[in-house]
Image (tube, coloured by chain):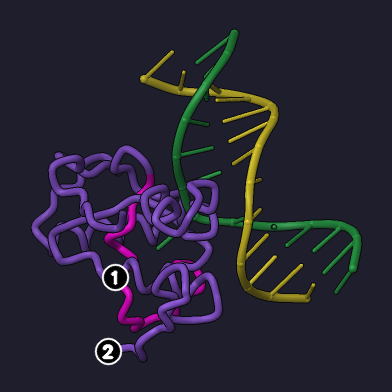
Chain colours: A purple, B green, C yellow
Amino acid sequence: MRSAPEPGSPQRIVGPGFHARVHALVATVPPGFVTTYGDVAKALGSRNVARHVGFAMAALPPGSDVPWWRVVAAGGRLAMASALVQREQGKRLRAEGLVVKNGRVVGFAAMRFLGLG
DNA sequence: CGTATGACTTTTA
DNA sequence: GTAAAAGCCATAC
C-alpha cells in the first residue's frame, strides 16, 4: 500500500517522477492481460507520452516487480525493442496464456486490459 | 538551462 | 499490404 495521497492531488501519483506512474499503472495489469503504450500514456494524461512509457520500461531494472512484458505497442504488436527483448516478451506472454504470433498478440483486443481509464 | 534521445502513435501516400 | 513524416514530452548529459 502506498501512502494515501492528498485529496488535493489530481491523480493518484505514487511518485514525483513520470516513470513511477508508468510503473504503477503497468503493475495494475493482471496476468493474462495486456495493455498498450498509448493506453498507459492516455491514462497518464496524453497519448503522446507513449514514447516515455517505453522509456520507463527500458529504465526498469532486471528483476523488477513491473510486468513490462504485458505492455505492447498499438494493435497488440510487440514494441520496437531489441529482437532479444521481443522474443523474451513473447515468451513471457505465452507463459501467461496469451498467444503471440509473428510478433503480434493474437486476440489482443479480447485480452486487452481495460481499467486504466 | 539547452540539446539530444527515445521499448510510440497516427495520418497520409 | 508497406513506407515515410510529423507530433509530442520526460529523462539524461
* Residue type (three-letter) at the residue carrying disc 1: Pro
Q: What quarter of the picture does the C terminus of chain A occupy?
A: bottom left
Task: Using the rendered image, report if marks 2 and 1 lie on a common chain.
Answer: yes
- Residue at point 48% right, 59% down? A54
Number of numbered tags placed on the structure image: 2
Q: Residue at x 43, y 83 (%)?
A: A6
Q: Which residue is mark 1?
A: A67
Q: Distance of mark 2 from mark 1, alpha carbons?
A: 18 Å
Question: Residue A44 has which mark?
Answer: none
Residue A58 falls inside the magenta stretch: yes
Question: Quarter holding the N terminus of chain A?
Answer: bottom left
Q: Is residue A30 left or right of residue A45?
A: left
The local crowd at label 1, few if under 14, some if 14 to 19, many if 20 or more residues have their Cα within 10 Å, is: many
Q: Disc 2 vs disc 1: which is toward the camera?
A: 2
Residue A96 on the magenta segment: no
**Residue drawn at the location 30% of the way across and 63% of the way down:** A69
Residue located at (39% from left, 60% from top): A84
SS class of the residue under badge 1?
loop
Q: Which residues are magenta?
A: A57-73
Query: Answer yes or no: do the residues labelled 2 and 1 have beta carbons within 8 Å?
Result: no
Pinpoint residue A78: horizontal percent, then vertical percent.
35, 48
Sequence-wise first label, 2 or 1: 2
Disc number placed over residue A1 in the picture, else none: 2
Q: Is A101 on the left-hand or right-hand side of A7? A: left
